[in-house]
Amino acid sequence: MKISKLTPQGYCSGVKNALKIAYEVLSSPTYPRPIYLLGSIIHNQNVISDLKKKGAILIEEKGKSRSELMNQISSGTVIFSAHGVSPIVYEKAKAKGLTIVDTTCGNVLLVQQQMKKYLSLGYTCLYIGTKGHPECEGILGISSSIQLIENAKDLKNISSSKVYVTNQTTLSLFETEKIYQEIQKKFPDVIIDNKICKATTVRQQACLNQEKVDLCLVVGDKASSNTKKLALACQSISIPTLLIEDVEDLKTISLEGITSVSITSGASTPDYIVDEIIEYLKRVD
Ligand code: SF4
């Protein structure tokens, strides 16, 4: 079996930074205990399990916002994830006297700053993102006047002569481009500020530029936005694609007749998970 590892793949700089900080905090006696992770610091359950073993307490509940989750924390240290948080989350943490450790990625901070700037200049601000995603929650929490655009239909009731639009950092390159084209058609003078980050861009481009294979394995957490978009990129060039979390997922899949496999992984997938998958593929070949 021919196995090709697409590059780049795996941890992005934002995830590496967030994890480095989280592990430092957990190993340092100077941070007040308990130490909470407000939502998964990255979308990867293997990594979260390891952080829990080292003493972190994960506060997460399906359907609850990070602002609501803050109500469950009353003392100690709170770690904000690379996705960023809304101003209300910050205010709640401060009001409770918590020690705040903010690992928000610089790319996300830039989107937050730009959004605040254009709101203050009186623009109608649009944000292309995925409802419920923590990065999106952090941005929408800046102001109730920011309008979430998940697809072109969401533009229907918006009318303004002064429009600014930006987006979640981990979206699909081609899907976002399509929405931007629709926005440009409706608002010719719009200020478009595409903020898909470089890590997301180069990983998707590697998927789009790959040679034809029988199967592409996209490795990552099923809740990870950038991982799902990698799978979408591979499917868009008609390559049969599977999103798997780890080697155990792969063991349940028949590889009969597969002679070539490519592998990529999301920005929150540790290298060792990909290495285990490659070792397994070599063994079953
Ligand atoms: S995917 Fe991009 S924006 Fe998100 S943490 Fe990584 S570098 Fe930052």
Image (cartoon, helix red, strand yellow):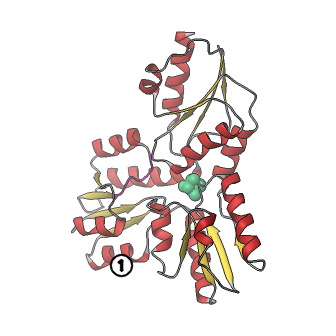
Q: Residue at horizontal 62%, vertical 39%?
A: 9
Callout 1: helix, strand or loop? helix
Other-residue count near label 1 (Cα within 10 Å), few / some / many at <14 / 14–19 / ≥20: few
Question: Is residue 73 shown to the viewer in this render?
Answer: no
Magenta highlight: main SS: loop
- Residue 75 appears left or right of 47: left
Q: Residue at horizontal 44%, vertical 68%?
A: 85
- Residue situated in front as seen by the camera: 20 or 226: 226
Q: Quadrant of residue 190?
A: bottom right
Q: Quadrant of residue 98?
A: bottom left
Above or below, 232 relative to 113: above
The image quadrant where one finds ligand 1 is bottom right
Give the magenta part as a residue range: 38-43
Q: Quadrant of the N terminus?
A: top right
Identified by mark 1, the residue type is Glu
- Residue situated in front as seen by the camera: 33 or 150: 150
Q: Quadrant of the C terminus?
A: top right
Q: Is residue 72 magenta?
A: no
- Residue 98 appears left or right of 122: left
Question: Is residue 51 shown to the viewer in this render?
Answer: yes
Q: Which residue is mark 1?
A: 91
Q: Position of residue 3 (x, y in %)?
A: 65, 20
